[in-house]
Structures are given as structure tokens and as C-alpha cells.
Amino acid sequence: MKELLIISLLGIAVLAADILKLRKAIFPLIMLGLLSTIVCCIADWGHNEIPFQQYGGMLLFDNLALAFTVVISLIAMFWFVLTSDYFRGDGARRTDLYALALFSICGAVVMVSFSNMMMLFLGLEILSIPLYVLAASEKRNILSNEAGFKYFFLGSLASAIILFGIALIYGATGSFDLATIASKVAVLGSSSTLLMVGVTMIIAGFAFKISVAPFHLWAPDVYQGAPTAVTAFMATIVKAAAFAALYKLFNGAFAGLSDKFTTSFAVMSAVTLIVANIIASVQVNSKRLLAYSSVSHAGFMLGFIMMSTSVPGKYLLFYVLAYSIASLTAFGALHHVSSIQEGDESTDAFKGLVKRNPMMAVAMTLALLSMAGIPPLSGFLAKYFVISGVLNGGYLWLVIIMILSSVVAMYYYLKLIIAMFTPIENAGRIVVARSQQLLYGLFAVLLVALFFGASALELISF
């Protein structure tokens, strides 16, 4: 519970600091708050805290929730440092954006720690509503306004579908509590039409949120139109929270129905991988390319959901961490490259990056290779874990699609890598803040270190 209180109070403290004219203290305060959250998670490990248990205990901070809270907080710290130049300018605007991001992170923590369906919906809305504003935060940019409207409209539709599904599940089981729902599901099975329709609606609603086919059509437009800093947030923290929540549902409350939806998840994963990678391979706008790449990785992570009863959540956690670091690196480099080139987001904008900023180019190269699944990088092990789980489940055809899609992904990632190492005349250096330069170096190290440190997963139990 301390973790949730720290982040929510941190958002309020940021607004208060702006009122008190303490704007210089805001960024250090955010870093300290997120670091404190990580420390509290480590201190609470193994305690399985249920806040306000006497009032129903609608949250559960078990090891799964604490582990994902640590990853979300860590990625948030990286995100704030990497995009700090986006928040420069008008002080009031900067403070508002900081606060909105923190409140959205608060929703993400609720989504990984809920033990009641109503808390799931509240967490989803707390996560989403600030993002609608952030997506449209560039008020003079028509693409940003369009992205905010599309995200709001389709996000609201997805939330409504999820809420309807929750209502149907309540009608079938008589409870919002996950443990009670799990016991009812074990008895009812697939015999209850009301229950099956409710679960199907929740899957459909989450499919919008995590952008898997055929519910992904909004993602490329919103990712392209939103400010790149916000796109990086949506592609990492939002996906992490949504997949953690979906895993928690099908590993717990809906575990008795997992086998009924396994084939559906497999088909959605396959369609997502095929569509996303084929379309990504013909993109000339690097932001849309990375958007389809994000959709493709959602297809991979869906493999953990379809095998949730047999694959431990720690492997999904590893995939989320490896993917988030690589994605932050890619979107961060795009943000810095396009901002110095008057908004140019084409693949040609990366030409000569190896001389313009060698550290950024190395980190970006490693990030793209990691997302493609090339060893010895963390993305290789992340894909190995999901492919191994799917193969053990007997879905050889899906494994073949996953491997072939990675080959296609290598093609369009190579387009960006080749552009970075293509010489260009009269190209000035791309200078970023020292903290950001060091962060790119840290990302490069982590992408390799996580590959060799993955054995530490055996020490984690949840």
C-alpha cells in the first residue's frame, strides 16, 4: 500500500511545488519518490499485504504486484530522464505534464495489484484518462489533437466494453472479488453463457488497450500523432500494466476457463504478428514503424496470457523489462533525432547517427537487435521464454509464425540500422544532456547484462 500512496502523493506534491514556486525541486522530487517506491517494494517482498482488509481488501500487494511495480517505477525513472527536454519551456505546462504522468503511473500500480474487478476498472481509468490529455498535449499540432481524440474515443469504448464484461461476470458469479470469482468459475465452467460472454468482452476490451489484431488499428495513428515522449510512455508503462492485469486475471480468477480461450489467444497472436510485421516492413516513417513493432511485441506477449496457467509470471516480467528498455531507447533516439531535424521522422533522419552521436547510435542498434531477438541480447531470451511456453502447450504452428515474424522484423529493423551507419555530409552533432547520454550508455549495458543475468529469475518466486 505504501507504494501506491507514495506515487499518488508524489503527483499532488508536484502540483504543490509549482504553487509554492519550487519548480527546480520537482524533478529531483520525482526521482526520489520513484526510488522510494522501489525500496518499499523490496522491503515488502513476501508479505502479501492486503490494505484495508476489514473493508473488503480490494488490493493485494503480493510478489507479482511488487515485482511489476518495481519494473514500472524503474521504467518511469528512465522515461522521466530520457524525455526531460520535452518538459522544458513553460513552467506551469511542465508541472501539469509531470503530474499527469505520475497519476497515470498510479493507475498502473492499481492495475497490477487489484484483487477486485472494480479496482481493475478504476486502475484502468486512472491510467488512461491522463494519457488522453498527454496525447493531445501539443495544442498547436493538429496530429497531436487528432491522436488525443482517437485515443479518447477508442479508449473510452474499450473501457465501456470491459465494464459491461465485469457486470456480466458479476451477474454470473455474484461477486467482484477475484478469489470468489475463481471458485465460482471452477464450478460453472463454460456452462454459464453469461460468464463466457463477460470474459469475452473483457478480452475484447483489453485487446484494444494492448493493441493486438484485429483491435490494433488505432495504435499507428495515435503513436504517430502523439508527442514522441508520450508515445514512449504508452508503448512501455501502459503495455506493462495492461499485460500484468490480463495475466493476473487468467492466472487467477479465470484460470478455470483458460483452456477455453487458449486457441482464441493463439489466433489473435498469430494474426497480430503477421499483420504488424508485414505492414511495418513497408513503412518509411520510423515512428509508424516502431508503432507496428510495438503491436508485434504485443502479439508475442499474448503468448504468456494463453499459457498463463503453466508459465510463471516472472517470464512475462522479464519480457516487459527487456522490451521496455529497448523501446525506450528507440523512441528516445527518435525523439532527439526528429527534434533537431525539424520534426523529420523518416528513416532517412537517422542517416549518419553513428558520427552525430555514437553513444545513441550504439544504444539504438542494440535496442533494435534486441527487439528482433538476436543473441546475446535480452530480447532473445524474452522471445525464447514465450516460444518455449507456447511450444510446451502444443502450438507448434504458432511457434513457426513467431520465428518467421522475427525474421521479417529483422528486415525492417535493419533499415534503421543501415540508415544510422550511412555517411551523410554536413551533418551536425546531436547533443543531448549529460544525464541522457549516460542513460543511453546504461541502456546499452542493460540490454546485454539482462541476457547474462536472466538466471537470477530462478531466485524469484511468484
Image (cartoon, rainbow, N blue to C red):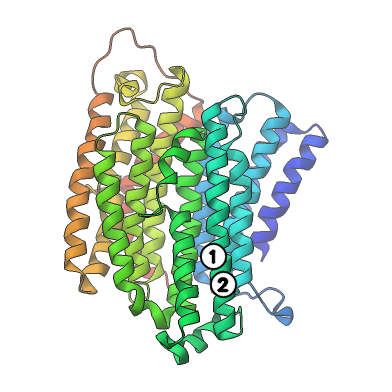
Foreground: 410 or 10? 410
Tell which residue pokes out farthest to the bottom in this image: 187
Give the number of the disc on residue 451. Answer: none
Q: Determine whether label 1 and label 2 are within 8 Å by CB.
A: yes
Q: Which structural element holds mark 2? A: helix
Reading the image, the residue beneath label 1 is 162
Q: Residue at x 62, y 28 (%)?
A: 139
Check disc 1 and give the amino acid type. Answer: Ile
Residue at horizontal 51 percent and vertical 70 percent from the top: 63
Residue at position x 49%, y 67% from top? 202
Residue 125's spot in the image, x, y percent?
Answer: 62, 57
Which residue is disc 2 drawn over?
A: 166
Find the residue positioned furthest to the front.
Answer: 193
Note whether 327 is above or below 427 in the view shown.
below
Residue 307 or residue 365, whichever sits in front: 307
Describe the element under mark 1 as helix, strand or loop: helix
- Identify the image quadrant of the N terminus: bottom right
Amino acid type, mark 2: Ile
Q: Is residue 373 above or below residue 280?
A: below
Image quarter for residue 307?
Answer: bottom left
Q: Position of residue 251 (x, y in %)?
A: 43, 75
**x and y percent of residue 384 in the render?**
24, 60
Please indicate whether residue 350 sits to the left or right of residue 75 in the image. Answer: left
Q: Is residue 428 above or below residue 27?
A: above
For this view, does 79 lie left or right of residue 385? right
Instruction: Tell me where residue 187 appears, x and y as whole percent.
Output: 46, 92
Where 10 sits versus 435, above or below? below
Quadrant in the picture for the C terminus: bottom left
Q: Is residue 462 visible?
A: no
